[in-house]
Image: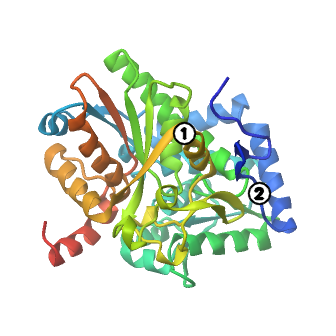
Amino acid sequence: MSVVQITDKGVFQAGELVFGGSQVPEMLQAALDKVADAFRRYQHDPEFNDELNYYLRQYVGRENPLYYAQNLSEKLGGAKIYLKREDLNHTGAHKINNTLGQVLLAKRMGAKRVIAETGAGQHGVATATVCAMFNLPCTIYMGEVDTKRQALNVFRMELLGAKVVAATSGNRTLKEAVDEALMDFAQNSEDTFYLLGSAVGPHPYPLMVRHFQSVIGREAKAQILEQEGRLPDYVTACVGGGSNAIGLFYPFVDDLSVKIVGVEPGGQGIETGHHAAPLTAGHPGAIHGFACYVMENSENCHSIAAGLDYPGVGPEHSYYKAIGRAEYLAVDDKEALHAFLELSRVEGIIPALESSHAVAYAMKLAPTLQRTQIIIVNLSGRGDKDVAQVAEMLEDNPE
């Protein structure tokens, strides 16, 4: 029997703790039910999957490599570090795996318009990309703070024909972008498809995103078996909402010999309260219509990486923590920045600041392990979008 036990309403139950589900107004629930019905109808449909797989191969460039980071591994000593190269996908991150799946679903549902939220901008770019390809108008909601620190991605979205709307309430980051996107969807669901980017939100989005992102873990498993003849000892990925992580983790979840570690953004330090690590330092609660671990004070939510700056987390990650299948810990801004620079200099690979959190953890873990052991890190995106931000930070505080 699988480790993951879930109801048809997207509810994960771990003892008395319940995660996921859908806690939304009736009008929005009716729209979500239509999406859930369409997803159930098409997720195993051969014609749908043939079309999706065609675009994943010919447009995205899958499968991407599982790369042995030999220079970094030898410098650190200890375990071998492998990088699952989602940064090599078209648009530069894992996000397009999901946007392709959902836009094909939107087409079949007859949607005339697509909306999305974005933090670092990678999901926004991926949404704008597939909407351009399929000739669907789209609107992307993005926190005003994030539009400034990710100005390059704002330009890319607009270049691709998307309308970018800055969310100006609250912290003006990812949470507020999701707030506005959900409001738009509730008001315009008759002709609008909400293409949600992370493994969060009310049912069916967490399951839908996991389904489309699981290509990451399926490929990584086959690739490590081919290259090493066995499964890894550890798989690890950064966790904000958690889409890249759940995509890597899910295909390994029943392989109990594989340790699963999610790396949250520790921001300025867990002790300061200015972080985005609800699994490390939060409590069970609810946000955006679903139950999960949430931060004590969402107003203090902070990360160096815009894509991780979210006070909640995916319900499936919450469930993995509650049942003990995965461990979640935090890496702070300074550690992530150091990993960003180190991977760039040692391997010639510039990672996204989001992915740098997972690289930082692997850099700490590898020297504590044997040379025969293996760590797979999901390199969820490339760092082109972050270089201006990092350059400014290094000007103020050179490493």
- The one of 309 and 361 positioned closer to us in this rendering: 361
Q: Looking at the image, is 343 positioned above or below residue 307?
A: above
**C-alpha gap between disc 2 and disc 1:** 24 Å
Circle 2 residues within 10 Å: few <14, some 14–19, many ≥20: many
Task: Return the x and y of residue 325 as percentages of the image width and height.
Answer: 53, 36
Q: Is residue 210 left or right of residue 396?
A: right
- The one of 365 and 67 positioned closer to us in this rendering: 365
- The one of 159 and 64 positioned closer to us in this rendering: 64
Q: Which mark is residue 324?
A: 1
Q: Looking at the image, is 172 positioned above or below residue 63?
A: below
Q: Is residue 369 left or right of residue 290?
A: left
Residue lying at 33% horizontally and 33% vertically, measured from the top left: 375
Task: Return the x and y of residue 21 as percentages of the image width and height.
Answer: 75, 53
Residue lying at 74% horizontally and 43% vertically, measured from the top left: 39
Element marked by disc 1: loop
Residue type at tag 1: Gly
Element marked by disc 2: loop
Q: Is residue 93 left or right of residue 123?
A: left
Residue type at tag 2: Ser
Q: Is residue 287 left or right of residue 376?
A: right
Furthest-top residue in view? 229
Q: Which mark is residue 22?
A: 2
Residue 220 at least partly seen: yes
Residue lying at 53% horizontally and 56% vertically, measured from the top left: 241
